[in-house]
Amino acid sequence: MNAQQQAALDTHVHCAVLANAGAGKTQVLVQRLLRILVVENVDIDAVVAISFTRAAAMEMRQRLHHLID
């Protein structure tokens, strides 16, 4: 991950990830969610992640489940 992607992992600040296709947005968001769930021990039912498409939301969900399992 580059410096900007690493900065987006800081869970103590709000974050909007804007980038071109293939830039790693999904990876950054999944890593941020993973950090919130595992490091900060937040219940998954207390987290909201918004995507513009169902396909992108499903991709994030699958990646997150793969990392957790």
Image (spheres, rainbow, N blue to C red):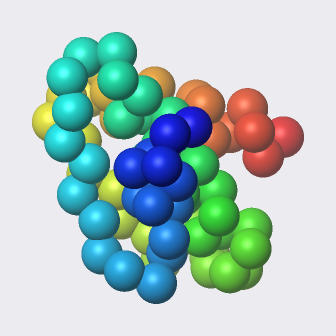
Q: Write the residue at 46% across / 84% down.
A: 12
Which of the pair 18/62 is nearer the observer? 18
Q: Is residue 62 above or below residue 47?
A: above
Q: Residue furthest right?
A: 69
Could you say where residue 61 lies in the image, as x and y percent from the top left?
Answer: 52, 37
Could you say where residue 46 lies in the image, as x and y percent from the top left?
Answer: 47, 77
Q: Is residue 33 above or below residue 59?
A: below
| Residue 44 visible (yes or no) | yes
In this rendering, the count of numbered labels is: 0
Q: Residue furthest top?
A: 22
Q: Write the residue at 30% across / 75% down.
A: 14
Q: Is residue 6 above or below residue 63?
A: below
**Quadrant of the snapshot with the C terminus:** top right
Which of the pair 67/14 is nearer the observer? 14
Among the 4 quarters of the image, the one containing residue 65: top right
| Residue 60 visible (yes or no) | no
Q: Is residue 49 left or right of residue 38?
A: left
Which of the pair 20/65 is nearer the observer? 20
Q: Residue furthest front?
A: 3
Could you say where residue 13 lies in the image, as x and y percent from the top left?
Answer: 37, 80
Q: Write the residue at 78% across / 46% down.
A: 68
**Quadrant of the snapshot with the N terminus:** top right
Q: Is residue 41 left or right of residue 15?
A: right
Q: Is residue 64 above or below residue 63?
A: below
Q: Write the residue at 26% across / 28% down.
A: 54
Which of the pair 3/69 is nearer the observer? 3
